[in-house]
Every structure is written in structure tokens, then in C-alpha cells.
Amino acid sequence: MQNYRMMVMVASLERHLENERKIIYEAIIGQSAIPVGLSFPSMSANYLLKLNNQCLNDADYLFLLIGKEYGPITEKGTSNLHQIYATAQAMRKPIVSFVYNGSHTTEADLFDQKRREGFVNSLKTASTFYWSSADELRDAVERGLERVQEHSPSVGWVKSDQSLSFSASNNIDNDIVAKLKLQIDELKQRIEKVSSGTHDSILDFDADPRPWNMSYSCNAFREGRLKQFSGHLNYDMRAIFDWLSAALLSHVAESRVQNLLAGKIQNEVLSEAKRLWKGCHAVSDVKIDQDSTDDLKKRLRLMGIVDFDEQGRWRLTSAAEKLTLMQQK
């Protein structure tokens, strides 16, 4: 009997999606996972947003169910559903989206549909599934849960009456403890090596002293209106190193690196949007152009800061890792 269960937060609007939420809940339970979360009503509901944020904090994954509507706008300029999505991104929660692509038979508000279109466009990733019927949705949920567990495995939750034993009979826990001990021993060895050495001239920040010229795109909001923006920002390469060094002590997927950088520049992007679009009060879905990411990869590699494995994941070189650990002392 499997003791561990994945917890999946299901976020959606309430109107027109009651049956679809039931399908998702049944499919999740059928895969031995735990569905949580409350649907958002057809009006702004801050108390439900707080409750759903609590569910999201405990959940292993977020499943977004997108129907025919974007949803009511809150004082932050986005819908509650969009805010849950942004919070999950900030928390680095794996997100799987299920987007309705059938016929729109209801009388829809033009501005709502425009906002929905912009929101859906920001979700077009490998973890987005499209559905137009109950059978398609059920199949998509089952495939989505299998995929997210394969690509973003999580420890999950365990029943409180199942005591965590480290005896020989519990092979799973023994494996986890053994791996943690190995990681601790490796870290101790690295710290000892760093403590006995110096870091003079181990990195060449002067190999390319130019600032990183980065292009970005985002959604900006003003009084319930959505507008897509793009722009350029410049950053010193040492600042980029400071932003990424801690995360790159272990292998990190390129998509996560882009999310880390997007989080760092969000305030400056908001300032630019306010300057260019008077009255703008919020931005979301900040994305860094792939050409800018590729340029950063080449420059960090030239400076001896980053290496890449066969799967394209980023990690600090030995020299950059040594400098990072020295700065933390």
C-alpha cells in the first residue's frame, strides 16, 4: 500500500466549470493523489484567494483549469485565478494548465476575452493541455499528472499514522538518508578545500566587460485593461553572477534560470511600464527573450562561470562555486 500521496491544488472559476472540476478531482483521486482548492466565484473574493493560497502553499503541484472566461478583475488589476498562477510561479511550483478550446457559446465580454487570450498565451508550454469535452479533459488530467510527477518529482505527503522509520525494512527512507549523508560529506569536503585556498584570478569578469543587454516582454495592467509590453534593460555581469550563483550550486534547468532572472527584474519592468503607460499599476508574466538568454549563456561560459550538462542544465564551474562559497563565509 502506497503511503505517500501527491497533493494537487486545482484552481478555476466557479461559473460554467462545476462538472469539469468534478472530472479533475475524480481523475486526480484515481491516480492516488489528493485534490485541494476552492473555485473562484463570479465576483472578486479575497477571502477565497487567501484560502487557496494556503492550499497552494501545501500542494506539490498546481493544476489550472481555464474555461471560457478570464474572471473578475481585482484591485491588483488581474483576476484571482491569474494571481494564483503568479504566486505559484514565484514559489516555483510545477504548473499544469488545462485550457478549453471548444466553441464559445456564452455571451462573453470583449475585454474579458481579450484578457483571457493574453493569459492563455502566457501558458503555452509543454505542460499545457487543451480540451473541448469531458473525455478529453479526463484524459488530459491523467497524462498531465503522470508527466509532472515524472519531470518534477516531489516527496508528497504521508499519513500521520504512518511512522517514519529508518530501519532496514524501509528502503525508501534509507535511500534518502544515505543520499543526504553523501551530500553533506561532499559539502564538507568542498568547504575544507575552499578554506585552504584563495580565489584570486579564478574567474575572468574582464573577459567581456560589457553590460548584459536583455530584452523582455510582459503583460501590463491599468484599470482592468491588459496591454503587452516589451523593452530592454542593462545589467552588470557581476550582478547577474550574484543573482544566480546560489541557485547554480546544483544543476538547474534553463527555464528555472529564466524565471529567477524574471523575478529579479520585475520591479524595474514595472517602473518602465509605469513610465511608458501612465496609470499602469501591475505587470505579470515577465519573460526574457531566448536570444538574450543565449547571449548570457555564451558570455558566462566565456568567463568561466557556468558549465552545461548533456541535458542543457546550468551549473557553476568549480572556480565559480569556490568564489560563491567564499562570499558566504
Image (cartoon, helix red, strand yellow):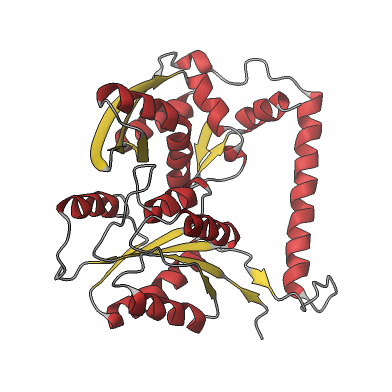
Residue 231 visible from this viewpoint: yes
Identified at 44% across, 44% down, the residue is 254
Indicate the quadrant containing the C terminus: top left, top right, bottom left or bottom right: top right
Q: Nearer the viewer, residue 198 or 245?
A: 245
Q: Is residue 47 left or right of residue 226?
A: right
Q: Nearer the viewer, residue 316 or 10?
A: 10
Indicate the quadrant containing the N terminus: top left, top right, bottom left or bottom right: bottom right
Identified at 24% across, 41% down, the residue is 225
Which residue of the protein is positioned furthest toward the right in this rendering?
167
Residue 312 visible from this viewpoint: no
Identified at 27% across, 55% down, the residue is 120
Residue 35 screen position, x and y as percent: 51, 73
Q: Is residue 322 above or below residue 37?
A: above
Q: Nearer the viewer, residue 51 or 263?
A: 51
Residue 133 screen position, x and y as percent: 25, 79
Residue 82 screen position, x and y as percent: 37, 52
Q: Is residue 265 left or right of residue 318?
A: left
